[in-house]
Amino acid sequence: MLWRCDWDSNLLQSMLSGGVSGGLGGALGWAARQAKAVVTKALGEVSEDAVTLSENSAVFSGYEEEDLAIAYAKRAPELEGFYDVIGHGHENGKIMAYVDLEGKVSGWITPDRVASALKQEQAWGLLQGYNGKDIRLLSCHMGKLDNGFAQELADTMGVRVLAATEAIAPSPSGELSIIDDGIWQIFSPGGTGGIPYAHP
């Protein structure tokens, strides 16, 4: 997950009641909700809120009420040339997860599933959607393995994927820090693992 990846009962102590509007206007928010619903149906997901798509990010969250880690990660400054994929990552570095309002895992997210959502969005040619950029995973532990989530996503999407080796702790302003001496690594399609990346 974004900071506090153990999925225990303390994980979601501070919940937001409703979505974070950020800088999006009403019309843009409505469009994002519609795109989310359509992609969710196309992927056959159990939750209507499986993925929220926007110009700069795809947020994999099963609930409108979001924990602060996801809300803060959505505020992270854009990294030029990268599209953000935001969600909770497992410490094994191989899988992301939906987490319910009590901090329990309610479903798993594979690299193929993320790729399917982004490719579908790209195929539709949405002006405010994924357009083939490199990907920054704002999800804990996704860059810890040479053959883990980040490398699989890079191979499937054919773009570079930037990921953290340990837990990410976003601040209320969106500043990203990696705890436990973790680093950012960049994974290339067809590669054999990540190489250190100087994230600004």
Image (cartoon, grey):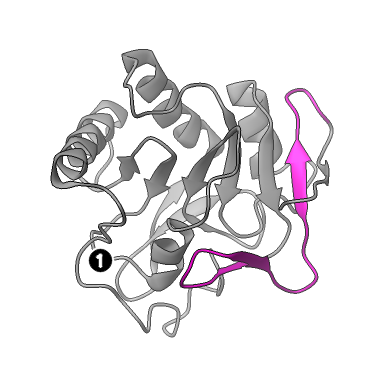
**Which residue is rendered at x = 44% and y = 85% of the image?**
10
**Which residue is rendered at x = 45% and y = 34% of the image?**
113
> Label 1 amino acid?
Glu
Of residues 117 and 100, the one drawn nearer to the viewer in this rendering: 117
Say which quarter of the image contains residue 125: top left
Of residues 151 and 31, the one drawn nearer to the viewer in this rendering: 31
Q: Position of residue 81 (x, y in %)?
A: 60, 32
- Please say if 16 is above or below 43: below
Is 151 situated left or right of 194 in this image?
A: left
Q: Position of residue 9 (x, y in %)?
A: 41, 83
> Would residue 167 be visible to someone looking at this image?
no
> Would residue 117 be visible to someone looking at this image?
yes
Q: Position of residue 151 (x, y in %)?
A: 71, 36
Q: Considering the numbered disc 1 on the image, is that residue within a helix, a strand or a loop?
A: loop
Magenta-drawn stretch, dominant element (helix, strand or loop): loop
Is 20 situated left or right of 193 in this image?
A: left
Say which quarter of the image contains residue 39: top left
**Which residue is rendered at x = 32% and y = 76% of the image?**
102
Identify residue for label 1.
65
Residue 189, magenta (yes or no): yes
- Please say if 122 is above or below 148: above
Is 46 situated left or right of 90 in this image?
A: left
Q: Position of residue 162 (x, y in %)?
A: 68, 43
Label 1: few (<14), some (14–19) or many (≥20) C-alpha neighbours in 10 Å: some
Say which quarter of the image contains residue 13: bottom left
Of residues 159 and 4, the one drawn nearer to the viewer in this rendering: 159
**Which residue is rendered at x = 75% and y = 36% of the image?**
187
Image: magenta residue range:
167-191
